[in-house]
Amino acid sequence: MQHFKKWLVILLCALFVFSMVACDKKGTNEPTDPGKEPGKVTLENIKIGFVHITDPSDQGYTYNHNLGTEKMKKELGLKEDQVINKFNTPEDQACETALRELAEQGCHIIFATSFGFEDHVLKVAKDYPNIQFCHATGFQAKTSGLKNMHNYFGKIYQARYLSGIAAGLKTEKNLIGYVGAHPFAEVISGFTAFYLGAKSVNPDVKMIVKYTGSWNDPTKEEQIAKALIDEGCDVLGQHCDSTAPATAAEAGGVFHVGYNSDMRTAAPKASLTSAIWDWSRYLVMAVNKVVAGEEIPVDWGEGLKEGVCDISPLNDAIVAPGTAEKIEEARAKIIAGDWDVFTGPLVDTEGNVVVKEGETFMEPASAPSWDHILEGIQVPKE
């Protein structure tokens, strides 16, 4: 009897240990597909998470980023349940919560796509060293000391320069307006490139910039667009997430250059073209790196030459004559690689030469840093 009790105790202990190991296994993101190497991430079992500040209905930034996600899924042959999206996530504690939920749901790689997410991404990445975290528009990955933290963006200023050419040729008042989100380098870099594109074909053009204080606030975007029209702007550009500036331009009888999506559907009588992204180029690369067991670049940013950014089709019914030809001339010059947008001489509103003649300012790979206000551009006084 004693012998039987001894073996019963051993058996119960063994069952207890086995159950604990099994429970622990459920809490990891290790794939358990039969016949596959334990812990091996493949295109068949990889899980990918996204945290977005809005949702695709914005017809702007999140819409465009999600287009990249769908293109990535198709190119890599991923199933619907391999991608988990967290839409409409504020840039606060809710972001951290969303990131942790994605980690616990077994994601091997997580993309956070808004500038204000970065501090939350850094915090969560420290707690999940085996998960790769990729943050768009950020700048802290290189100094974070985290091997699983990465920043990505692209040379969207090149596309904005091309779209600015359409604006510079179209304006009759030589006054264009710009609806910006925040007075951040990302926005300043963008509207500067837009202005330089316009000025390259219209030396007399001036630009007024007004900020909404939000990445996505259609009501405020419409109000500011109307204010710019009231000040005499006959072409509007934008760095904000909705189509409100486009529809306001059409209602006000002026023209418009968009961002992130082809806005001809929203404003067919106003939208000239838009600066757009193909985010799939980064997403495909990063996912393939995870599957191959290779390191994702700490900082990444490609441009027009690589197809990461471009402009949407021109609205041939309303663009000025010669627009396509001028844009193609500039495109060829940029792609050739011996010239770029921020080439001097460039002078700020105080008369300081910020880029000398013959020199070129190059944006860092993953985060715009140009923050000079050039002569000819009017911004709100602080």
Image (tube, rainbow, N blue to C red):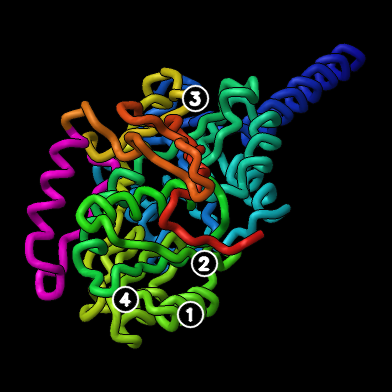
Q: In this view, does 224 lie above or below 73?
A: below
Q: In this view, does 299 lie above or below 246?
A: above
316 is within the stretch colored magenta:
yes
Q: Name the residue under label 4.
A: 234
SS under mark 1: helix
Could you tell me residue 259's position as x and y percent?
Answer: 35, 60
Q: Mark 2 points at which residue?
A: 210
Disc 2 or 4, which lies upstream in sequence? 2
Instruction: Name the amino acid, label 3.
Output: Val
Contact between labelled residues 1 and 2, with CB atoms less than 8 Å apart: yes
Give the extent of the magenta segment. Answer: 307-335
Query: CA–CA distance between discs 2 and 1?
Result: 9 Å
Q: From this viewpoint, is residue 34 visible?
A: no
Could you tell me residue 329's position as x and y percent?
Answer: 11, 44
Query: CA–CA distance between discs 4 and 1?
Result: 12 Å
Disc 3 or 2, which lies upstream in sequence? 2
Query: CA–CA distance between discs 3 and 2?
Result: 33 Å
Could you tell whether 366 is left or right of 206 in the image?
right
Disc 4 or 3, which lies upstream in sequence? 4
Q: From this viewpoint, is residue 84 visible?
A: yes
Q: In this view, does 58 lie above or below 107?
A: below
